Image (cartoon, rainbow, N blue to C red):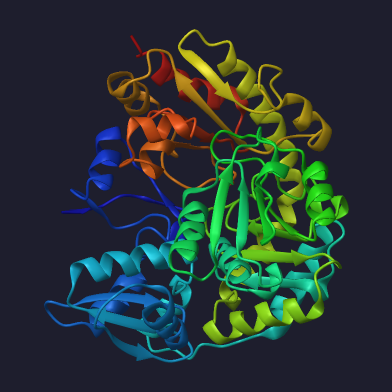
């Protein structure tokens, strides 16, 4: 059933308004098919229109960034049957008549982020020439390299999405010096977890261990460990790990370290100065800040050889997973307010976390600059001026009934997925990311099924509190 929802961010918005928890559940149970949403999860109308023009009745279509990418999926990465491929350097269309193959391909596209950008899709639908302006991206790289302290423009790469940036690194065997074992520190973003698991299961590397920020990492290092990946802080429990300690242990064992610093942002931390080898951001989030852009960036420290960067760049060019000019222009414009935006977001988030922490309808708040948070001392060390704009909380007597009462009556205009914008967004994060997981698995992940995540924006903090309080007051 097609369900019309309001986009957040305009024509190319990456989020949407989901007013009720029943609609969230309907989406996850596939009873509702949303027309808008995060563009790796829900096909943008321009992308869907392009697909619809290419397929016949009884066919399913997946469109990715290029024909070479379509070949990569069907011949190397995705375990699918008979498919038909068409495309060129601007798109790759995979057609199948098998629903299960479609489901695999769609999930793999989502995990890798090798998407057809909606701007490119619009040009294809309207049969317009796709122009390229190398100087635009050169200027953007210069701006981003100044924001990310310690970065070198010559060692910076732009991607079609944050997940594509991560995938570009993980598909490089040389970054791990042909060692097959990877360690992921902290409870990662769902697509990062699935991507690592699939790469391991499909023998593109050997094994992966997911460990807690509390675990002793030295116990997990093996002879063939070549790579350690950190999210800092993690999403959605906002856990912080000791970066310098991990870097020291890793480099002692000749292991590369990569950090996803999307949530912390370059305003609050400079991982390259902590000798982290690779820093990644989803530029969709706080760097852009307006819900109207999708992209990713990699910064490489001098510890990563030019040959490895060239290998990743070749993979990027082959599969056409670099950032398009339209997205580069949007990001370049929105970066102008990045510093002022983050000052307000840092202040608002800490104040909101403290308010929720004392609210009689809230059981627990996850924000590392609260003294009650388990990682408070580490957060104070690495994030002295702010921990970014993300926090999560669990309601008292957490369950479906209270979750519905709170979410449905909360009056925030932005109730939907994504994060990092000037507009505050409320998201029932565990329902959206771990809907089909068992209670036992959620317990292992430290997740409550009805955890609420807030990406705090730049609005007046009293207004944000008031919107949330409308829902909290409805709880039994």
- In the image, residue 326 above or below residue 457: below
Percent of width and height locating residue 95: 26, 81
Please give the name of the residue rendered at 85% of the width and 56% of the height, measured from the top-left corner.
149
Please give the name of the residue rendered at 40% of the width and 66% of the height, measured from the top-left corner.
108
- In the image, residue 401 above or below residue 158: above
Please give the name of the residue rendered at 33% of the width and 40% of the height, measured from the top-left corner.
435
In this view, the residue in front, 252 or 341, is: 252
Percent of width and height locating residue 146: 84, 61
Question: Would residue 29 be seen by someone viewing this image from the given angle?
Answer: yes
Q: Can you name the residue that lies furthest to the front here?
A: 223
Q: Quadrant of residue 452?
A: top left
Instruction: State the quadrant of the N terminus.
Output: bottom left
In this view, the residue in front, 172 or 386, is: 172
Percent of width and height locating residue 302: 86, 68
Please give the name of the residue rendered at 35% of the width and 14% of the height, measured from the top-left corner.
474
In this view, the residue in front, 271 or 148, is: 271
Percent of width and height locating residue 4: 25, 52
Q: Quadrant of residue 367?
A: top right
Side (left or right) of 265 relative to 365? right
Q: Quadrant of residue 225?
A: bottom right
The mark total stands at 0
Question: Would residue 428 be seen by someone viewing this image from the given angle?
Answer: no
Side (left or right) of 127 relative to 241? left
Instruction: State the quadrant of the C terminus.
Output: top left
């Amino acid at each position: 059933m097609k369900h019309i929802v309001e986009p957040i961010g305009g024509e190319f918005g990456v989020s949407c308004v989901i007013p009720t928890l029943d609609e969230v559940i309907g989406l996850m149970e596939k009873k509702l098919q949303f027309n808008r949403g995060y563009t790796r999860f829900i096909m943008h109308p321009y992308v869907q229109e392009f697909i619809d023009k290419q397929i016949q009745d009884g066919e399913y279509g997946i469109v990715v960034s290029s024909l070479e990418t379509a070949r990569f999926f069907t011949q190397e990465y995705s375990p699918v049957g008979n498919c038909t491929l068409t495309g060129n350097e601007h798109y790759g269309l995979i057609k199948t008549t098998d629903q299960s193959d479609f489901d695999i391909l769609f999930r793999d596209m989502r995990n890798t982020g090798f998407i057809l950008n909606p701007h490119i899709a619009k040009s294809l639908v309207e049969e317009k020439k796709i122009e390229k302006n190398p100087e635009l991206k050169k200027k953007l790289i210069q701006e981003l390299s100044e924001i990310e302290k310690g970065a070198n423009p010559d060692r910076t790469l732009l991607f079609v999405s944050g997940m594509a940036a991560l995938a570009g690194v993980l598909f490089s065997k040389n970054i791990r010096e042909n060692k097959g074992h990877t360690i992921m520190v902290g409870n990662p973003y769902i697509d990062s977890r699935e991507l690592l698991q699939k790469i391991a299961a499909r023998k593109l590397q050997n094994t992966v261990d997911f460990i807690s920020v509390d675990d002793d990492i030295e116990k997990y290092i093996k002879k063939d460990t070549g790579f350690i990946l950190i999210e800092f802080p993690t999403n959605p429990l906002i856990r912080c790990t000791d970066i310098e300690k991990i870097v020291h242990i890793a480099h002692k064992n000749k292991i590369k370290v990569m950090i996803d610093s999307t949530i912390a942002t370059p305003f609050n931390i400079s991982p390259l100065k902590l000798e982290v080898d690779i820093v990644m951001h989803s530029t969709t989030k706080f760097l852009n800040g307006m819900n109207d852009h999708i992209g990713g960036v990699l910064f490489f420290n001098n510890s990563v050889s030019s040959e490895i960067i060239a290998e990743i760049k070749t993979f990027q060019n082959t599969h056409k997973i670099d950032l398009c000019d339209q997205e580069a222009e949007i990001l370049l414009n929105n970066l102008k307010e990045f510093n002022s935006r983050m000052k307000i977001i840092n202040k608002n988030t800490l104040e909101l976390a403290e308010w929720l922490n004392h609210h009689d309808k809230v059981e627990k708040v996850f924000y590392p600059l609260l003294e009650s948070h388990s990682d408070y001392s580490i957060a104070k060390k690495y994030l002295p001026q702010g921990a970014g704009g993300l926090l999560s909380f669990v309601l008292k007597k957490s369950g479906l009934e209270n979750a519905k009462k709170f979410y449905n009556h909360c009056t925030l205009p932005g109730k939907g997925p994504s994060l990092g914008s000037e507009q505050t967004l409320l998201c029932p994060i565990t329902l959206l990311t771990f809907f089909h997981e068992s209670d036992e698995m959620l317990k292992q992940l430290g997740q409550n099924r009805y955890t609420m995540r807030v990406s705090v924006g730049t609005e007046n903090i009293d207004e944000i509190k008031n919107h949330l309080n409308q829902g909290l007051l409805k709880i039994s």
